Amino acid sequence: AQSVAQPEDQVNVAEGNPLTVKCTYSVSGNPYLFWYVQYPNRGLQFLLKYITGDNLVKGSYGFEAEFNKSQTSFHLKKPSALVSDSALYFCAVRDSGGTGFQKLVFGTGTRLLVSP
Amino acid sequence: NAGVTQTPKFQVLKTGQSMTLQCAQDMNHEYMSWYRQDPGMGLRLIHYSVGAGITDQGEVPNGYNVSRSTTEDFPLRLLSAAPSQTSVYFCASSYGGARMRTEAFFGQGTRLTVV
């Protein structure tokens, strides 16, 4: 069965400092990995994805993520945090195997708080 | 391009009432799905559809019905609301077939409270 773990409920970082939001996953086959962000009272917005290819994936708003197959991790990173990055971040995985609908399995979310 | 549109944004129901959450997408996506978001639990799949006329259950389907008469619309029906169904509901759509590597698009969510 697929699963995603986000070990930190909350990450605090000062504006201008680098940030990392952690994610580890488990799938039976090769993973499709996604990061989504949720701002207060808003829907989920897509940030970036790993399907295949380069292990470093670049996405929206200056975010990037590193896929590490041996550690089954897909940590979200940004070199310099902004106060406006404060939001709830979700990691999600989908199994690439099989045909037809493959559900997204989400982590429990990590709240990022960036202080001025 | 509106993407995925959900209505209503907020709803309060009494226990036992029924209602329909609407979802529409204008991207011609084959796949549509409903998730619920509860604190500390992430998002969980309720029902999904791979095309008009085809629906199937997700991991938490009890108390909900869906139908898909058109590619664009995928309503979620609560048959007899219970306090345990208090949650935030998200509709999502995505490509299927050869384009199923792409990401899912989500609506703005419906915050439902059952009293």
Image: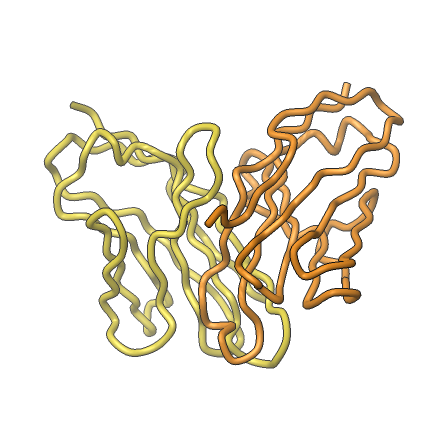
Counting every numbered tag in the picture gives 0
Q: Is A56 placed left or right of A6 in the picture?
A: left
Q: Is B70 placed left or right of A23 in the picture?
A: right
Please provide percent x and percent y for residue A54: 24, 75
Please provide percent x and percent y for residue B83: 77, 26
Above or below — where is B28 with respect to A15? below
Residue found at x 75% / y 45% = B76
Residue found at x 63% / y 58% = B32
Extreme residue toward the left, this view: A16
Residue found at x 36% / y 63% = A49
Q: Which color was chain B given?
A: orange
How are the colours assigned in the image? Answer: by chain
Above or below — where is B91 with respect to B15? below
The one of A2 and B49 positioned closer to us in this rendering: B49
Please provide percent x and percent y for residue B13: 78, 22
Please provide percent x and percent y for residue B53: 79, 65
Q: Which color was chain A given?
A: yellow
The one of A76 and B15 positioned closer to us in this rendering: B15
Residue found at x 57% / y 57% = B93
Above or below — where is A62 with respect to A53? above
In which quadrant of the rendered image does the C terminus of chain B lie?
Answer: top right
Q: Quadrant of residue A67?
A: bottom left
The one of B53 and A51 positioned closer to us in this rendering: B53
